[in-house]
Image (spheres, coloured by chain):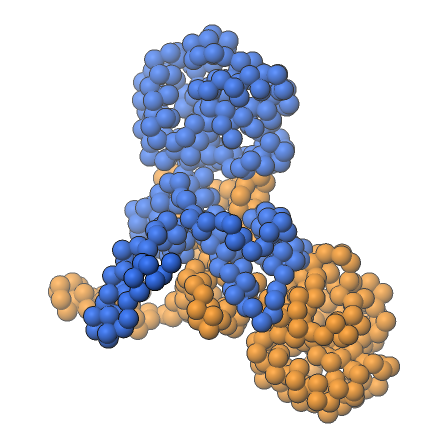
Chain colours: A blue, B orange
Amino acid sequence: MRIAMIGLGKMGANMASRLCRGGIEVVGYNRSPEIVERLANEEGLLPAADLSSLLDMLDPPRIVWMMLPSGEVTEDMLLRLGDMLSAGDIIIDGGNANYHDSQRRAVQMKDEGIGYIDAGTSGGIWGLENGYCMMVGGAEEHVSQIEPVLKVLAPSADTGWAHVGPVGAGHFTKMIHNGIEYGMMQAMAEGFSLLEGKKEFDLDLAEIAEIWRHGSVVRSWLLDLTAEFLSEDQNLESISGYVADSGEGRWTVAESIDQGVPAPVLALALHMRFASQQENGYGNRMLAMMRNAFGGHTVKTQDEQS
Amino acid sequence: MRIAMIGLGKMGANMASRLCRGGIEVVGYNRSPEIVERLANEEGLLPAADLSSLLDMLDPPRIVWMMLPSGEVTEDMLLRLGDMLSAGDIIIDGGNANYHDSQRRAVQMKDEGIGYIDAGTSGGIWGLENGYCMMVGGAEEHVSQIEPVLKVLAPSADTGWAHVGPVGAGHFTKMIHNGIEYGMMQAMAEGFSLLEGKKEFDLDLAEIAEIWRHGSVVRSWLLDLTAEFLSEDQNLESISGYVADSGEGRWTVAESIDQGVPAPVLALALHMRFASQQENGYGNRMLAMMRNAFGGHTVKTQDEQS
């Protein structure tokens, strides 16, 4: 079996490697060619210099797996692929697209006879070794054609992947997965922050994370990773507390509003990231001024703060 | 090595069994004697009919592990044990005591020369098979004496337990563990609630939980348990949404207030449990009446609601 992989960033490169090692032929294309060359040398990836040569190296029905940043980059690529692919071909979006976009794109591709699969993919940089968890949306006739690929990418042929529903259901499920991830991360970070704040006990946070990995109720892969970085440095003094968010947390909270179904902890975990992204945010300056206004409480200037 | 175990409820009985199977002699006492008899027959526990015969069956220094409900039951038992034990003996509280209580109790026992260890214990009903995670607080001279016991109770001799600090540090660490657990559980419950709410995709929640167990970022023991109960019934229609809380979540939030360290998601997870415990709560009735007062919005009576 041979497929094309477009986008060989952190996720795509590792997925291409896992496929090559698992006996799937992968034709690879990436905007900057260095990684293509490296994977060709190290993993036996078949390098393509541009999109048209990439597609020329596939026999119909051509199967093209995209691992690109969601949004404009994905949208642009789909416009180009839509022009170049033919009826019967299949596109898989393995990125973190908004599921509404995936539903719309599938309809557009269907007009050309092109199959569309949204494969929400989790596993981060550890997927190469451990395999990926894939939540796949699409028509049965399309998903069945890529099963051999899914079975190699997954932790094992029968675990970690499923055809969860029609197009859109894959990215929807991945979106909720990431929403849960935000909440679990925030809960863990708050707990460790309280351990760290308890100076009188002089707790060894790395040791606590390590013992929690065995037999405790909070044992989890996030805790495994946490124990690992804490074992190297538990003060984190050189780390900035700016926590990025990348869309899926926001969409999860928007979904809860659309459904009218409460998800307050997921929403709060997202808002705590927003708060972390503000330096001396306007809301807090407002609060300081209000305290001053009604109670005459002292207001710190920015100079005094720092 | 021989120790006494007082309190053979769900946790204590399984811990006594694991100790017996691991070659530790356990003298057991429980208020209601049926479980003592069962463990004597099935696990070789040495049964004691009352406290004084329990203590008579130990050689000094006597080591007594308590697995009792925190609060009054533990306090009463300690008053009795304090009178009956002698200098050099050691009491371990493996329950979920408030760490302030453990610190106070250790001081009281120290006056009698009795050692006090607070061993926060996690693992639930699965600990018998998997071993327990134990966060141990106390003086080195006392903790070193119970190491053989900890090594049998833990998942393995070298994993899942540590002497984390002075008396109080064990229950403190267990308290934070449970606070994190509240947040992780709430995050997961909210995510699955949004999956369930997406009727158009007709998602198989048991299948999604199962695939997330492999390769995803949210894989965790809580997810393992979730996948298991969802595989039997994913509608949960017969289940009441009343979610109990048992103290440690409240103490974690109180701790964040004492420290002045933010833990908003842990606090919210706790408050969501409070909300689940209210049927037609006063706050919501107030809100309905306020909407009515300023906007003339219709108010449902309790009869219409149900």
In terms of depth relative to the viewer, which is nearer, B50 or A217? A217
Report if residue B285 is visible in the image: no
Task: State the image coordinates of residue B261 (x, y, percent, origin top left).
Answer: 45, 65
Q: Is residue A175 positioned above or below B239 on the image? A: above
Please state, as top left, top right, bottom left or bottom right, where the N terminus of chain B lies in the image: bottom right
- Tell me where residue B11 sits by quadrant: bottom right
Q: Is residue A98 positioned above or below B246 on the image? A: above
Q: Is residue A34 positioned above or below B175 on the image? A: above
Task: State the image coordinates of residue B162 (x, y, percent, origin top left).
Answer: 70, 63
Task: State the image coordinates of residue A4 (x, y, percent, origin top left).
Answer: 50, 17
Count how many numbered circles sit on residues in the image: 0
In terms of depth relative to the viewer, which is nearer, A26 or A59? A26
Quick check: B77 left or right of A288?
Answer: right
**Which residue is depicted at the point 29% across and 62% down?**
A301
Report the residue that reaches farthest toward the front: A303
Q: Is residue B224 positioned above or below A30 on the image? A: below
**Which residue is depicted at the point 35% across and 43% down?**
A251
Please state, as top left, top right, bottom left or bottom right, where the C terminus of chain B lies in the image: bottom left
Task: State the image coordinates of residue A19 (x, y, percent, origin top left).
Answer: 59, 23
In terms of depth relative to the viewer, which is nearer, A34 or A266? A34
Quick check: B7 left or right of B279?
Answer: right
Quick check: B125 left or right of A290?
Answer: right
**Which residue is depicted at the point 32% across and 46% down?**
A254
**Which residue is depicted at the point 56% across and 48% down?**
A222
Quick check: B65 left or right of B277?
Answer: right
Report if residue B165 is visible in the image: yes
